[in-house]
Every structure is written in structure tokens, then in C-alpha cells.
Image (tube, rainbow, N blue to C red):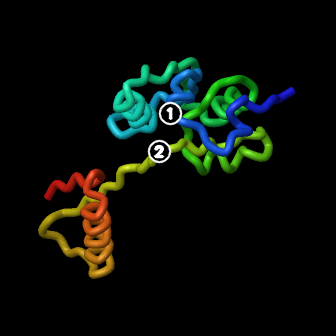
Amino acid sequence: MITLHRLARRKSVTLEELAQERWSCAISASGAFGPLELLRRAFEERGLPGPRITLVSDLVNFRLRAVAGSDLIGVAIKGNVHAAATRLRLKILAVKGFDWTRPVAVAYRKDAYLSPAARRFIEFLKDTAQKNSHYAHWRA
């Protein structure tokens, strides 16, 4: 029988509460911009101990089933969780005071043709990043 995690009934949780939990993540989640590294930094910025990683696997379905059948908290792509949420009774936890953004990169040859649509898209990304300056990392 699958039981809900004790935090699943909550409207939102705090990072302080999540610091007490055991975690599941993908091996690839530990890269410089991976979700695990972003989570570690968020904990560190608040003076919290790093996440206690209990299960590490790049097998998405395995991790989701493990989280559904245990007291683990998972770090996963939202779309993967949504796809399995009903079947496995998973819930995405809203975390107070924690905005999670994924990095976006645009690569193109400097002297090559770039369509007007691509140029507009790049300008849109730059403008958005400048408005949110803590996310801006541009390299020409």
C-alpha cells in the first residue's frame, strides 16, 4: 500500500523542513546547474546542512516509484512527475521562498547568418535576464 508522505498534505513547505528529509536524485542532477547543486546552494545560503541523498539513480521511473513507496523526497523534472502523479500518487511540493529556475543557453556562430526571429529571441532572453539580473550570465 502506498501512503502519502507527511509533507504531501501541506499547501507549502520551507527549505528548513526539507533539510530534515531524505532525498532521491539522478546522478546527472549533480552538475554545475543541476537541480541537486541548486538545492545544495539554496540550503547552504540559509545555513542548512546539505540534502541527505539516500537514493541515486538515472532511472526516472525507478526513482519516482521509490519516492512514491517511501518517505523520500525527490528532485525530478516537473513533467516526469506530472506524467506519473496520478498513477503513483505523487505531489509536487511548493517551497516557500524558493524560486527554482533552469539555466538557458543560446549558442550560435558569431559571423554566421542568424534569422530575424532568432535575433529577436536572443534579444528577448537578454532583456529578460537583465530584468532579473541575478540570473544573467552572458558571454559573447
Say which residue appears at 26% left-offset and 72% top-offset: 123
Amino acid type, label 2: Gly
Q: How many marks?
A: 2
**Is residue 77 shown left or right of residue 8?**
left
Q: Residue furthest bottom?
A: 116
- Residue 106 vertical placement versus 82 (above, below): below
Residue 54 sits in which quadrant? top right
Amino acid type, label 1: Leu
Say which residue appears at 32% left-offset and 35% top-offset: 32
Where the C terminus falls, by quadrant?
A: bottom left
Local packing at callout 1 (Cα closer than 10 Å; few below 14, some 14-19, many 20+) is: some
Q: Secondary structure at mark 1?
A: helix
Residue 117 sits in which quadrant? bottom left
> What x and y, as percent, mark residue 101?
42, 50
Q: Secondary structure at mark 2?
A: loop
Local packing at callout 2 (Cα closer than 10 Å; few below 14, some 14-19, many 20+) is: few
- The disc label shown at residue 89, or none: none
> What x and y, as percent, mark residue 78?
58, 48
Q: Residue furthest right?
A: 1
Say which residue appears at 61% left-offset and 30% top-offset: 73
Contact, CB < 8 Å: mark 2 with mark 1?
yes
Where the N terminus falls, by quadrant?
A: top right
Question: Label 2 belongs to which residue?
Answer: 97
- Residue 29 vertical placement versus 130 (above, below): above
- Residue 29 vertical placement versus 121 (above, below): above
Say which residue appears at 27% left-offset and 81% top-offset: 116
The one of 11 and 67 positioned closer to us in this rendering:
11
> What x and y, as percent, mark residue 135?
30, 52
**Is residue 58 shown left or right of residue 106?**
right
Question: Label 1 belongs to which residue?
Answer: 15
The one of 44 and 81 positioned closer to us in this rendering:
44
Q: Earlier in the sequence, mark 2 or mark 1?
A: 1
